Amino acid sequence: MDDYVKIEIDKRKGNIKDLVVQTLESAYILKNPTYITEDDVLLCGAMLYEEFKKLNVRGNLIPLRVQTNDFYKALVKASKINNEVNIINYQKEYIQIDQENLNRISDDFDAIFKIKMNQYTFCTADDARELVKRLKSEGQNVVIGSGLVVKFAKEIGMEGVLWYGKESVGLSVDIAFNILTAKLAEQSNQKRQNYILENFNEGVINLNVIGRVLSINQHAVDLLGLGDYGDLTSQHISDILPQSEILDVLSTNKVVKDMVVPYKKRILLLNTLPINVNGTFNGIVALFSDAETLQQQENKIRRKIHYKGDIAKYHFRDIIGQSEQTLKAINKAKKFARSDSNVLILGESGTGKELFAQSIHNESSRSSQPFIAVNCAAIPENLLESEFFGYNDGAFTGAKKGGNPGLFELAHNGTVFLDEIGEIPLSMQAKLLRVLQENVVRRLGSSTAIPINVRVISATNVNLIDEVKNGKFRMDLYYRIAVLNLFLPKLSNRKGDIALLVKAFTSKNYPAFFPLIEDLLSEIVPLLEANEWHGNIREFENTLERLFAYIETPYNITKKEVLNYLYESIEENHFLLDQVNFENASYQEVIKDIEISKIKEILEKTNGNKKEAAKILGISRSTLWRKLNEHVEVK
């Protein structure tokens, strides 16, 4: 029979991995019933099935059941040995019919198989052994039955025919594999549930109707401090949780939503979901969230949705310069970074105020939190309040459905950088002051105050003290934002950094030109140092951009050409600043003056050849003539 079992199992095992097939003596299992686990499937005879049940053998027990075809085959085989066969079955006769029909069937068997058929039963192994011995003593020499019966018969020299054949074994193996498949599916579902449970952002406890733990994830164990209790399954919730508001809630069958509960040193958000089956209370599921973690997650989501680019990417190491003025500003800013007080950065346009603001943030204890930068001059006055503090749904016509958080909400626990703060109108200054004093914001259209914790770094290129004197800036707001003051030197006061700035700019933006510039650095730097740089770093970088555009390629160019191009690039700054009257000329007039200046410059280089000049400028000759004529007419 073992061969039958192996063949049938091999046919069905398919993709079931790690399937272990093992043959065990029944005596071993009877002596060691705990060897069989709940995950095992055990095929056995009917008598052993009953014995194993009495011993509470675990696992899935499947008794072999003799199928009709296998019985007939065993009968045919036995009839070839003797014309009188003995069928021995456990507890009840195999053929269950009344005496009259039994006699008729016996006559049929006698007519077809030419045999006489006797039926016997046994209740224990000893009964079976004695029965076989008795049949032997009565002159019988063949029996049909289970493996136990066949074994006893062969021990005393009788013929034993096993009646478990391919069909009987196949049916039992089918049942076994159905059970295995169901168990695997159950295990897969359990693993899936455990995986989901453990990857919940919330702590989850599932309690049965009397308050015992059915399941709990690690997040709940950590939040509630239950790590010392070991396996919590089946423990009563009152035995593991101290007397608290949480325990009171879990002892009821009420729905609780977003309940804020102090627990030990945490603030937790509690939600409960009672489970009702057919209208009857069947337990409760509780979800716990750490309030501080929720705030952090909310801020992350808000930043991703609304301000994906507002992060502080610069550090102090990105500030280029070794001059005394630069190092002094960096060292002072590093000290400010260790404080949590508000900072006012003062300096001309282009001196790197946002670069320092980002570096201070990244060096501070808030570095892992948001950095929200806003140019106060770039936001229309009528939108300032909604941008700063947010708005609720329906706060004004065109308000976004669902409302919108403001910059201060988005920056919770982080830093707000208010560039050009001197441009904020007085009406808005009063509202900003209140937020900085109270550390709460109120969205437009809402009466609810939202607590915030932000550090404000402000920047300006105007003299705020003069603005205060002139009544354009509130003195109380000034003192609130200017607890710490950082003065940034203009480029003309730190000309010792120019060589470093040239190399850094070239290396980053035009690496192919770096060898050329490095060779000429000693002659380039004096020209740059001689300039006043009214636009500071912005003007400096624009000048270098223009220089590289003129050079075009770092190959086959002379030193004289490079220096001439540099001089020309610097002179264009003077032209824009000194020769054009920005106060009296329109934007279009400024552009025309620049165009004519460039055309004249090219015409001088081509000795008045307009065709060649037009080619260099990338315009047609007719366009060149038109622009010159327009200039003459204006004059």
Image: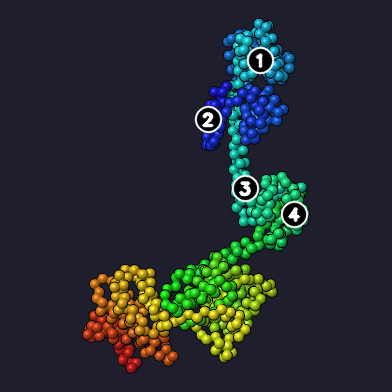
Question: Looking at the image, is mark 2 or mark 4 earlier in the sequence?
Answer: 2
Q: Which mark is residue 242?
A: 4
Residue at 57% across, 69% down: 414
Q: Nearer the viewer, mark 1 or mark 4?
A: 4
Which amino acid does the dot numbered 1 rest on?
Ile
Q: Secondary structure at mark 1?
A: strand
Residue type at numbered disc 2: Lys
Q: Quadrant of the N terminus?
A: top right
Label 2: how many Cα within 10 Å (few below 14, some 14–19, many 20+): few
Q: Residue 632 vs residue 482: left or right?
A: left
Amino acid under label 3? Gln
Q: Quick one: SS at disc 3? A: helix
Tell me the amino acid under the disc marked 4.
Answer: Pro
Q: How is the image coloured?
A: rainbow
Q: CA distance from mark 3 to mark 2?
A: 32 Å
Residue named by callout 2: 11
Question: Which numbered circle lies on residue 87?
Answer: 1
* Chain-order first, disc 1 or disc 2: 2
Q: From mark 3 to mark 1, how far is it between C-alphas? A: 52 Å
Looking at the image, is 357 positioned above or below residue 461? Answer: above
Which residue, given by chain and number where applicable, does mark 3 sit on?
193
